[in-house]
Amino acid sequence: MLTGEMVFQTILSNLEISLGISRVSPVINDAIGALIFGIVVLIGVTIFDYLFGWMERKLIAKMQLRHGPTVVGKYGLLQNLADFVKLFAKENIIPANANRWLFLISLPLMAAIFTFIVEILPYGPAAWGVNLTLGMLLVFVLLSFMPLLVFMISWASANKFASISAQRSVMMLISYEIPLFLVVASVAVLSHSLSLTQIVAAQSGWWYIVLMPLGFVIFLIAMLAELERPPFDLREADSELIAGWLTDVGAPLYAISLFVDYTRMFVGAALISILFLGGWNGPALPPEMWLIIKIVAVSVVVVVIRATVPRMRLDRTLRLGWLWLIPLSIVNLTWGLLLVGGLL
């Protein structure tokens, strides 16, 4: 059976032979392998983003007794492509009072950070660009830049509605990062590692959703808040803040924001699958295929939540984070310590 490891090794070997670099140091070979892996993963995530956007529109339309995209392409599959072409063809308008360069680089910088996270995630027992010992810690350190970038975009636009929206988003992101990190600490305690590959290997028997169901629920809720997905999409309270901190961005930057949103969705679904659903562990199918199936399943759950759960008010969102999720995440961490200590 053809596995991801065999595919990447074959590509790397052919490239080395064609370029005549088979005798170059292992460091260069590893760098070339990481580059090839990164390009393949980036193409794969771009395809996921495109199909997820189409699936989200069709699934929500089905649940609301509508048709969704149907005109452009078979089953509307080319509608997203038409939308992106339209957005990038339009003029990139910048507000007169905006900090021009900061306004222009904020969203591309956000896209670059999430693209980098996608590149360092493992997708199989040997399908990774760089096997980091502290990979999980690096991922969540990069995620912690989100409040800063959100506030930077709103401040650069010089729009009071964007500023209010960013303040709401930052308050929510900070309050939900605490239970998120506590749950991650619980997973690290159970697996005795901060390496994402080792965390998946530790779930070869029992998945952590079985050992820590409370941690899974907390992580899912906190991750939805980190991704600003409904019911935590406070940045786009239509009747109050228009499009929130994206109100003043032009069409090309808005297209980049859509790429960022869907890439964030991929990262969130991949982390849930790796930390709680056994990652690529599964029978019969290639390991990478199991991880893809789990990511798609988590994505469908997120879309169903968007279609069925109304947006929460800011005060209730903060109360849920500070008064409920943080204490429960401490309980979950204690549970993990008891499991490791053999007291349960």
Image (spheres, rainbow, N blue to C red):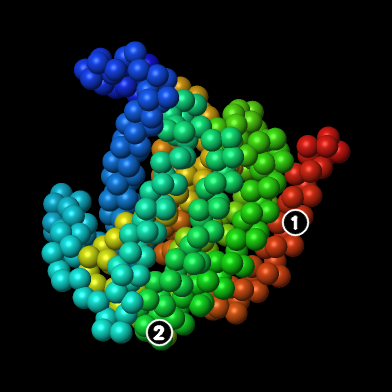
Closer to the chain start, of discs 1 and 2, is 2
Q: Position of residue 234 (x, y in %)?
A: 47, 74
Q: Quadrant of the C terminus?
A: top right
Q: Position of residue 96 (x, y in %)?
A: 26, 84
Vertical relation: 255 (above or below) 204: below
- Horizontal side, residue 250 vs residue 224: left or right: left
> Residue at 51% of width from left, 77% of height from top?
168
- Horizontal side, residue 41 vs residue 330: left or right: left
**Residue kind at label 1, given as amino acid type:** Ile
Please tell me the numbered disc located at residue 86. none
Vertical relation: 224 (above or below) 344: below
Q: What separation in Å lies between label 1 and label 2 (alpha carbons)?
A: 36 Å
Vertical relation: 164 (above or below) 43: below
Q: Which residue is mark 2?
A: 161
Disc 2, SS:
helix
**Residue kind at label 2, given as amino acid type:** Phe
Residue 88 quadrant: bottom left
Disc 1, SS:
helix
Disc 1 versus disc 2: nearer the observer:
2
Residue 62 quadrant: bottom left
Q: Position of residue 18 (x, y in %)?
A: 21, 17
- Camera-side residue: 333 or 131? 131
Residue 261 quadrant: bottom left
Crowd rating for badge 2 (residues with CA inside 10 Å; few <14, some 14–19, many 20+): many
Instruction: Tell me if I can see residue 288 in this picture.
Output: no
> Residue at 59% of width from left, 46% of height from top?
137
Q: How many marks?
A: 2
Q: Position of residue 6 (x, y in %)?
A: 37, 19
Q: Which residue is mark 1?
A: 330
> Residue at 29% of width from left, 22% of height from top?
11
- Camera-side residue: 157 or 171? 157
